């Protein structure tokens, strides 16, 4: 724990509920493994408490509070919806939010066995999400922007973790994404952070999407990268057929962004192997498998 990090315990969560939402204070509180910027606590059977932890700004939670109630009713998969707001106090000087619980197992601890069903499910979800965002929607300079804006980040990841035998191929995929025509449509709603810890699965397929803290209005290719990052090998083509809105340029951008996201997962795995804060040892193999799918193409 760093000097600026507050230790979050079940007693703290219960105390905050007693102070601000006493009608919920009698529900069972259980820690949910994982999380870095925010820490999750299960509250009873149907709710969860999302606690600002390492995020330096409350902006991700405030975005979820503002926009998830707008988006959730028209999305075909369960997403966490804010139901109560927790405000900074002497007991805990950061934001926290009570949200609906999305049942299922995070994909980084589970698997997809019904690949075709998952491809169709993800495509249907993103078709519903990727509609023009209102003028007041949040914007992003990285996630949601054209791939070229992230070239420095890609280069750092490539140097850090790319296997030597495929590094040139990975760079070629990225360069092709940067060269592809930019998104020319209106900015659409983008989740922005679709990776295996931010989706849940049950019965062998996708059953929910979580963590919308990086949502913004931008290029849908950032989410379309999930065709390789989330789905089993051989199902990307089915995904794009069902999505039916991605032209060749969008697929090229998405594939390059998937390469970058795969390298990020590998870096987090490497950090975990080294015992560094925030590292996830089990993400390394997940990232390498995703990178292999990227290199196989559509």
Image (cartoon, grey):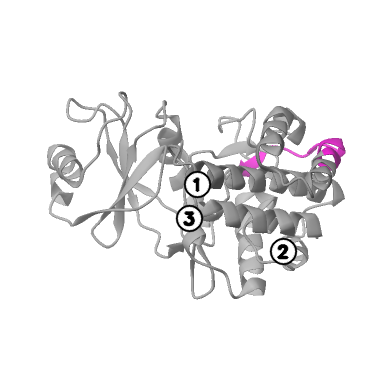
User: Quick check: can you spot residue 105?
Assistant: yes
Q: Position of residue 222 (x, y in %)?
A: 67, 44
Looking at the image, is 228 positioned above or below residue 133? below
1 and 3 marks in contact (CB < 8 Å): no
Q: Which label lies toward us, 1 or 3?
A: 1
Instruction: Name the element at disc 2.
Output: helix
> Label 1, on which residue?
273
Q: Position of residue 119 (x, y in %)?
A: 66, 66
> Label 2, on which residue?
239
Q: Earlier in the sequence, mark 2 or mark 3?
A: 3
- From the viewer's perspective, tell me whether residue 122 is left or right of residue 169: left
User: Quick check: can you spot residue 220?
Assistant: no
Which corner quadrant of the image does residue 46 belong to? bottom left
Instruction: Name the element at disc 1.
Output: helix
Q: Residue at x 30, y 24 (%)?
A: 3
Q: Which label lies toward us, 2 or 1?
A: 1
Q: Which label lies toward us, 2 or 3?
A: 2
Q: Residue at x 85, y 43 (%)?
A: 172
Q: Residue at x 51, y 41 (%)?
A: 271
Q: Position of residue 24 (x, y in %)?
A: 17, 50
């Amino acid at each position: 724990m760093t000097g600026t990090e507050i230790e979050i315990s079940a007693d703290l969560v219960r105390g905050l509920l007693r102070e601000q939402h006493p009608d919920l204070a009698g529900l069972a509180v259980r820690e949910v493994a994982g999380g870095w910027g925010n820490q999750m606590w299960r509250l009873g059977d149907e709710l969860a408490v999302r606690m600002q932890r390492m995020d330096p700004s409350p902006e991700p939670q405030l975005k979820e509070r503002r926009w998830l109630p707008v988006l959730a009713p028209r999305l075909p998969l369960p997403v966490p919806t804010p139901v109560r707001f927790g405000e900074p106090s002497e007991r805990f000087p950061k934001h926290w939010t009570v949200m609906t619980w999305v049942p299922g197992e995070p994909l980084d601890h589970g698997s997809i066995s019904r690949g075709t069903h998952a491809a169709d499910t993800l495509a249907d979800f993103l078709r519903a999400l990727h509609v023009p965002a209102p003028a007041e929607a949040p914007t992003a300079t990285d996630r949601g922007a054209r791939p070229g804006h992230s070239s420095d980040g890609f280069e750092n990841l490539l140097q850090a973790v790319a296997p030597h035998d495929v590094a040139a191929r990975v760079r070629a995929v990225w360069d092709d994404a940067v060269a592809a025509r930019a998104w020319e449509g209106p900015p659409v709603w983008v989740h922005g952070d679709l990776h295996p810890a931010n989706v849940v699965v049950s019965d062998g397929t996708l059953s929910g999407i979580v963590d919308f803290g990086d949502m913004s209005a931008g290029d849908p290719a950032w989410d379309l990268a999930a065709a390789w990052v989330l789905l089993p090998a051989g199902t990307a083509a089915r995904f794009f057929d069902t999505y039916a809105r991605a032209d060749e340029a969008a697929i090229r951008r998405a594939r390059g962004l998937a390469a970058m996201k795969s390298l990020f997962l590998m870096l987090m795995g490497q950090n975990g192997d080294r015992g560094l804060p925030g590292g996830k040892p089990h993400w390394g193999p997940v990232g390498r498998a995703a990178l292999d799918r990227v290199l196989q193409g559509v």
